[in-house]
Image (cartoon, grey):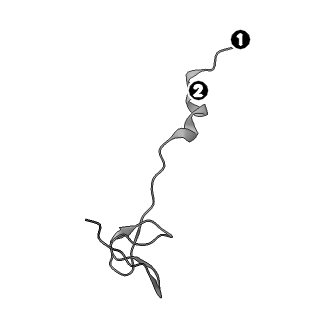
Amino acid sequence: MVPVQRKTRSQSKMGRSHKNAKVTASVRCPNCGSAKLPHSACAECGYVRPGLRLNLTKED
């Protein structure tokens, strides 16, 4: 089967509009001030929330 009519250029581009790159949000760590992903532990100091901190070890 063959489509009755071709899609125009704008229709083709609008069909691909959801495939764009997403911007990754980042927030400042309240403990050390470095950038981190929201709802995750800080890579520099291990801070998650008040009263909870992950022990980070340096891998050689």
Query: In the picture, residue 47 is in which quadrant?
Result: bottom left
From what the image shows, is residue 21 above or below residue 39? Answer: above
Determine the residue positioned at 51% across, 70% down. Answer: 39
Q: Quick one: which residue is furthest to the left in this view?
A: 60
Name the kind of residue labelled 2 in the image.
Ser
From what the image shows, is residue 51 above or below residue 12? Answer: below
Q: Which label sits in the foreground, 2 or 1?
A: 1
**Front residue (pair 57, 3):** 57
Element at badge 1? loop
- Mark 2 and mark 1 lie on one chain; the one further toward the N terminus is 1
Question: Is residue 57 toward the left or the right of residue 12 in the image?
Answer: left
Measured as percent of width and height from the top left, residue 15 is found at: 61, 32
Mark 2, residues whose alpha carbon is within 10 Å: few (<14), some, or many (≥20)? few
Question: Is residue 60 toward the left or the right of residue 46 in the image?
Answer: left
**Front residue (pair 41, 21):** 41
Mark 1, residues whose alpha carbon is within 10 Å: few (<14), some, or many (≥20)? few
**Image quadrant in which the C terminus is located:** bottom left
Measured as percent of width and height from the top left, residue 40 is found at: 47, 69
From what the image shows, is residue 1 above or below residue 17? Answer: above
Q: Quick one: which residue is furthest to the bottom in this view?
A: 51
Measured as percent of width and height from the top left, residue 14 is found at: 59, 33
Q: Gap in Å between the C-alphas at discs 2 and 1?
A: 17 Å
The residue singled out by tag 2 in the image is 12
Name the kind of residue labelled 1 in the image.
Val
Determine the residue positioned at 44% across, 65% down. Answer: 37
The residue singled out by tag 1 in the image is 2
Measured as percent of width and height from the top left, residue 17 is found at: 56, 37
Question: Is residue 4 toward the left or the right of residue 41 in the image?
Answer: right
Query: In the picture, residue 25 is in which quadrant?
Result: bottom left
Question: Is residue 42 toward the left or the right of residue 49 in the image?
Answer: left
**Image quadrant in which the N terminus is located:** top right
Element at badge 2? helix
